[in-house]
Amino acid sequence: MNQSSVPQQGGGLEQLPCLYCGETYGPGDLALHTEPVHCGPCITCVDKPACFSCRLMYCVCDVHRYRG
């Protein structure tokens, strides 16, 4: 009676989409999508992970620079 009626997925880790870029990622890409990058003076980018893409036209951060 200790068995759950909800099936477990292999390894117990689901691949969920990133909150910042929308890509699904696995354990190998965890740092890219979760670890904050201290990139510069842009108030929109501060403490966002490397996958984040800034929407400010005048962003000066090398990591998150506007690419539109």
Image: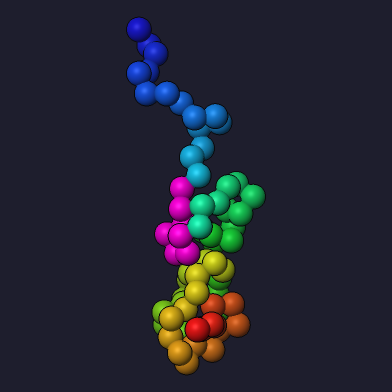
The vertical placement of 46 against 8, above or below, is below
Name the spot of residue 27 as percent of width and height, x first.
Answer: 60, 46
Q: Main secondary structure of the magenta part?
A: loop
Q: Residue furthest top?
A: 1
Name the spot of residue 35 as percent of width and height, x first.
Answer: 54, 61
Q: How many marks?
A: 0
Left or right of 4 on screen, residue 34: right
Left or right of 33 on screen, residue 7: left
- In the image, the segment drawn in magenta is 16-22
Quarter containing the N terminus: top left
Q: Residue at x 60, y 82 (%)?
A: 62
Answer yes or no: is residue 21 visible.
yes
Most foreground residue, 17 or 31: 17
Q: Residue furthest front?
A: 68
Q: Residue furthest right?
A: 28
Q: Residue at x 59, y 57 (%)?
A: 31
Name the spot of residue 17 as percent of width and height, x first.
Answer: 46, 53
Most foreground residue, 67 or 49: 67
**Quarter-wise, where is residue 57 in the image?**
bottom left
The vertical placement of 34 against 38, above or below, is above
Q: Residue at x 50, y 44 (%)?
A: 15
The vertical placement of 25 against 39, above or below, is above
Name the spot of residue 63 as percent of width and height, x first.
Answer: 59, 77
Whether 64 is among the magenta residues is no
Answer yes or no: is residue 41 visible.
no
Name the colouring of the figure: rainbow
